[in-house]
Image (cartoon, rainbow, N blue to C red):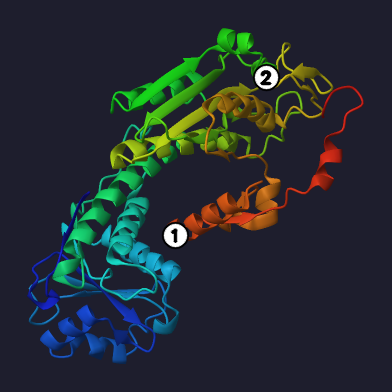
Amino acid sequence: MEFSVKYSSPEKQRSGCLVVGVFESRKLSAAGQALDKASGGHLTGLLRHGDMDGRSGQTLLVHNVPKLQSERVLLVGCGKESEFNDATFRKAVASATRVLKDTGAGDAYIYLSELSLKGRDTYWKVRDSVQSIADVFYVFDQLKSKKDKPHRALKKITLVVANRHDLPEGESGVADGQAIAAGMRLAKDLGNLPGNICTPTYLAEQAKALKKQSRKLSVTVLDEAAMEKLGMGSLLSVARGSRQPAKLIVLEYRGGAKSEKPVALVGKGVTFDSGGISLKPGASMDEMKFDMCGAASVLGTLKACLDLELPLNVVGIIPATENLPDGQATKPGDIVTSMSGQTIEILNTDAEGRLILCDALTYAERYKPAVVIDIATLTGACVIALGKHAAGLLSNNEDLARSLFDCGKTSGDRCWELPLWDDYQSQLDSNFADMA
């Protein structure tokens, strides 16, 4: 998809499709009003007859609008103007994009970035639009022998800004939005791959492929022998039942000053989680290929860092392994020694995420990071608590937690803080080891 930014009058624009907003009470956006005036009231006539009322996400595709040079006009509902916010803006862009995919138009001009959105500038609206459009167009068909192809693919989208002086902001928004979307696409692709392809070794290969993109990135992959020397008995205990060798993948992005402490990102990389000896139920076990999405998020973030050339230092650490039952697999009741020197009694082998992450977090200490952000599909109980609408956030640093919460609101990837009370510590007590 080719993206561009432009300032133009809609009534003079030649295009496969023009996209304009409609608020509830059938109020057209400024671009919509300009089109309506040029067409002699054609659009307001349709709205008056009840074809659309402007509810959020509603769409109406209109062909052959009189006196316009464009082939189509797509009206998209934006909800109540007084309640127009980030969520309704994203919904409008996504709804419009889903219709555009099937219109047969070769190009489209989207006049939604001109809408007034409290607290958001042109840069944000354009960047977020690019990410939303890329998200709608995302398809994972790498493993299909025959790929579905539209009769006439939409090849170019132009995001129109409200004023000529907004063009530099808009162009920056397009560039950054595409970089972030590329990182998101990499993370999604890795998550969607099956466990027989996306193995720990495959994840390591993807990290090495990123290294070729920039001299600012270095990649180190530790094998099981190297982890054994470091005393990573906790991580290695999870890998014992698998024929796929575990890997500890370390990516170092140096975009900031040498003296600047890095941000450490630690991502859980269980490429398939059967539960081990504490076997999961068979239903939906195929979805356990997604248990490496923390690792995928780290790789996607590092790709975005490279594309954006961010002026900071980032260390990505990915403990990658499978969790499978086998004669050699760890058993409930086994005790292992972590890299920190603490012993752990394993009561349930399906609690493998914390076992691999604890060694990765100990390894991260050597970088003396400014902050550590651990990303993991740690437990389905979090989905039960919060639903699918937000990720769980646990932190021992209030400032960092607030920053992540605010960033989640900005990006639309919301999180909600859960408690880390000292009262929980006693639940880790063990009669036989330092913790259970």
Query: Residue at 67% across / 39% down in the picture?
Result: 283
Assess whether mark 2 and mark 1 are in contact (beta carbons under 8 angstroms): no
Q: Considering depth in this image, is 287 or 231 the residue closer to the camera?
A: 231
Quarter where residue 123 is shown: bottom left
Q: Considering depth in this image, is 138 or 158 the residue closer to the camera?
A: 158
Query: Residue at 67% across / 14% down in the picture?
Result: 240
Residue under numbered circle 1: 410
Identify residue type, mark 2.
Answer: Met
Give the quarter of the figure containing the C terminus: top right
Q: Where in the figure is residue 335, as x and y percent of width and height?
A: 81, 18
The answer to whether residue 396 is left or right of residue 202 is right
**Residue 91 visible, this angle:** yes
- Which secondary structure lies at badge 2? loop
| Badge 2 density bin: few <14, some 14–19, many ≥20, Cα 10 Å | many
The answer to whether residue 434 is left or right of residue 130 is right
Q: Where in the figure is residue 393, as x and y percent of width and height?
A: 62, 50
Above or below for 147 versus 172 = above
Compare marks 1 and 2 and give the one earlier in the sequence.
2
Q: Where in the figure is residue 158, as x and y percent of width and height?
A: 18, 60
Query: Residue at 40% across / 25% down in the picture?
Result: 207
Query: Residue at 51% across / 28% down in the picture?
Result: 317
Alpha carbon of mark 1 to alpha carbon of mark 2: how far? 37 Å
Residue under numbered circle 2: 339
Above or below for 93 versus 80 = above
Identify residue type, mark 1.
Answer: Thr
The answer to whether residue 124 is left or right of residue 72 is right
Furthest-front residue in this view: 259
| Badge 1 density bin: few <14, some 14–19, many ≥20, Cα 10 Å | some
